[in-house]
Image (tube, helix red, strand yellow):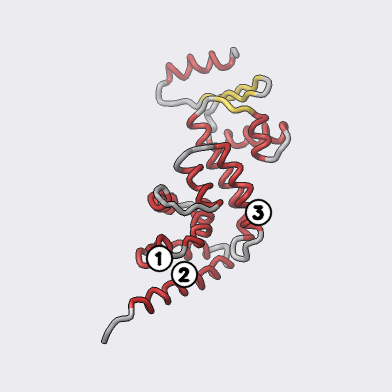
Amino acid sequence: MQIDFKHILLHRGYLIHWSLFLLKDAKSGPEAFLDLVFKKEYYSLIETSFYNLFKYLIVLAVISKSKTHIKRLKMTLEGLAHEDPFVKLFKSMFIDFDLESSFSQVKDCSKIIKSDYFLCEYEQLFLTKTREILLQNYIQLNSSIEVSTFSSFLDMDAKATQTYLNDFFKIQYPEAVLALNNDTLTYLIPDADTHSYVISYFNLINL
């Protein structure tokens, strides 16, 4: 009996698309969907034929607690010629570390998510997670934050942005030392070198 590979691939494509209905179960649906589509026989189809599904993979990978999905997507998208708002966002966040471009893309993606039947209920969680990831990336690459710049990115006024940043540091970096000078929030995150930390601390509070 001859195997019809085209028929097999077609039905795998149908299964991937029908599995989007798993996302209507917000509790377990996202991980169930990711577990399915990241299997080799299905993921290879997305890589070669169903670029439209990267939107779902990217959104769900960002909000997932597992970093494995991000790593897998990074390997694929880094050399992919296809680009849409979600692929551009992923590249700017996880490959180019371009904060300004990332926040611009987040706004575009948010509009699309809001109107997507399967993703609409994940919009707020997606916004929260992308902000956290982008801020963490920025903190690791810099030593201060311009509050006004982040205000425009976050669509918040200066006071709300300061509160957001303070809360973020309290949760993510509870040992961090913060100093606000006009519009600039300077921060110090202690490392294992206690001596350099103490010296940097006094330099910081004397700004």
Q: Residues within 10 Å of mark 3 (few under 14, many from 20)?
A: few
Rendered location of residue 150, percent (x, y): 64, 34
Query: Amino acid under label 3?
Result: Lys
Which quadrant does the N terminus fall into?
bottom left
Comparing 46 with 18, the one in front is 46
Tell me, yes or no, whether the two marked residues, 2 and 1, touch with CB atoms within 8 Å.
yes
In the rendered image, the quadrant that contains the C terminus is: top right
Kindly report which numbered mark, 2 or 1, lies closer to the viewer in this rendering. 1
Query: Element under label 1?
Result: helix
Checking the image for residue 73, the label placed there is none
Helix, strand or loop at mark 3: helix
Position of residue 202 in the picture relative to residue 5 (left or right):
right
Q: Mark 2 to mark 1: distance in Å? A: 9 Å
N-term-proximal mark, 1 vs 3: 1
Quick one: 183 or 14, which is closer to the camera? Answer: 14
Identify which amino acid the numbered label 2 is placed on.
Ile
Q: Earlier in the sequence, mark 3 or mark 2?
A: 2
- Residue at 63 percent of width and 47 percent of height: 107
Alpha carbon distance from label 1 to label 3 = 27 Å
Q: Quadrant of residue 184?
A: top right
x and y percentages locating residue 66 in the rendered image: 45, 52
Mark 2, residue position: 16
> CA gap, disc 3 to disc 2?
24 Å
Residue 45: which numbered mark, if any?
1
Q: Which residue is mark 3?
A: 111
Q: Is the residue marked by circle 2 packed among few (<14), some (14-19), or many (20+) residues within 10 Å?
A: some
State whether residue 156 is above or below residue 207: below
Q: Amino acid at mark 1?
A: Leu
